[in-house]
Amino acid sequence: MNYNIEYFHERVLAEIESWPADVLADYAHLVELLMEHGPNLRLPHSRAFGDGLFELRSKGKTGIGRAFYCYLLGKRVVVLHAFIKKTQQTPDKELKLARKRLKEVQNA
């Protein structure tokens, strides 16, 4: 496992841990793949949103979870924001928050 996973804030991890068990289990599997493959992880597991922002796409019978993340030097992955998806399209407010946090992390 080459990449280390970090969380922007403990609330991001708490949000993920509150997801339904099947969605959380899929997230755990995807995180293992992300740690192993890093930027080579692609659809259907991960999707690029541009400017260094990526989306981890977990799902289960009870719902769909999304976690936005970015890469930093030293093979670090920072999970910036996570939510349970309730609509077909990613809500603007979720994407804006992820982009705001991405800028904070990149400028730190």
Image: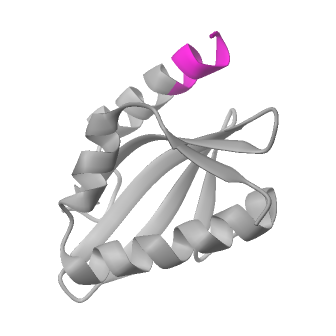
* Left or right, residue 82 beside residue 29: left
Residue 70 visible in the shown view? yes
Tally of marks = 0
Q: Residue at x 63, y 40 (%)?
A: 70
Q: Position of residue 11 (x, y in %)?
A: 26, 37
Quadrant in the rendering for residue 92? top left
* Left or right, residue 26 beside residue 54: left
Quadrant in the rendering for residue 25? bottom left
Q: Residue at x 23, y 89 (%)?
A: 61
Which residue is outermost to the top?
107
Q: Residue at x 58, y 21 (%)?
A: 105
Say if 92 sits above or below 99 in the image. Answer: below
* Left or right, residue 76 beside residue 84: right
Which residue is outermost to the bottom?
61
Helix, strand or loop for the magenta stretch, by majority: helix
Query: For the magenta stretch, what is the residue range?
Result: 102-108
Which sits in the foreground, 50 or 21?
Answer: 21
Quadrant into which the C terminus falls:
top right
Q: Position of residue 55 (x, y in %)?
A: 52, 54
Q: Is residue 70 magenta?
A: no
